[in-house]
Amino acid sequence: MKVLLVNGSPHKEGCTYTALAEVEKSLNEENIDTEIFWIGIKQVGGCISCGSCRGAGECIYDDVVNECRPKAMGADGFIFGTPVHYASVSGSMTGFMDRLFYSDLLGPEKSTFTFKPAAAVVSARRAGTTATFDQMIKYFTINQMPVVSASYWNMVHGAKPEEVLQDAEGMFTMRELGKNMAYLLQCLEAGKKAGIRHTVMEEKPFTNFIR
């Protein structure tokens, strides 16, 4: 089993990475393979809703989004981490997640994310964490992904990595999140071996509240 951790910060090994690395340690202790994927510092444009990804399963703009897709397809669970910018997800991470999830939604098969556990990790100097956390969770719930939690919201505080390491409760929450993700993945794997499968749903109606 493998968990893909996505670092949505412009700083490759900054505060967000520090939080994700703590989650990664707990996952590795439970024999879960991991990879931290950094979205980088190049501009990540937002989705233009062109629909070109329909049936193709990838975005028309061939950048870090399409680079991440094969890694996502091979993952069993996800941790998406972002810094707080103006009380919301960073601009690049928003564009990245919009296009990554939307191209999968319109792809030939909803298999990249559907039914795979996911969690959000948020890093801030001071405030804006809960608004950012709420924004992240919406990507998961629209894709039928079990949301993994801890005993507090998955956030850390600090302006520098060394300050994040001093956030005792935040670091504990990251470790707990890793353990909970590993536990859920192990439960899902046991269910598959026992022959448990998700029932097929009826075709979903698509409305605009008028028709």
Image (cartoon, grey):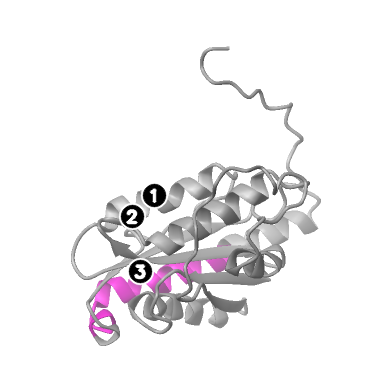
| Amino acid on which the number 3 mark rests in the picture | Thr
Label 1, label 3: how many angstroms apart (C-alpha)?
Answer: 19 Å
**Residue at the image point whose x is 65% and y is 72% from the top:** 2
Distance from Cα at disc 2 to Cα at disc 3: 17 Å
Question: Residue visible at 73% across and 42% down?
Answer: 198
Q: Is residue 204 left or right of residue 135?
A: right
Q: Give the range drawn in magenta.
A: 163-183
Q: Of residues 85 and 115, which is closer to you in this image?
A: 85
Say if 91 sits above or below 21 in the image.
above
* Amino acid on which the number 1 mark rests in the picture: Gln
Check contact, mark 1 vs mark 2: CB within 8 A. Answer: yes
Which type of secondary structure does the marked residue at label 3 adopt?
Answer: helix
Q: Which quarter of the image is occupied by the C terminus?
A: top right
Numbered mark located on residue 173 in the image: 3
The residue identified by callout 1 is: 135
Q: Is residue 135 in the magenta section?
A: no
Between 201 and 45, the one lying in front of the other is 45
The crowd level at tag 3 (other Cα within 10 Å; few <14, some 14-19, many 20+) is: many
Residue that carries the numbered disc 2 in the rendered image: 132
Distance of label 1 from label 2 (alpha carbons): 5 Å
Report the residue that reaches farthest toward the top.
211
Q: Is mark 2 on a helix, strand or loop?
A: helix
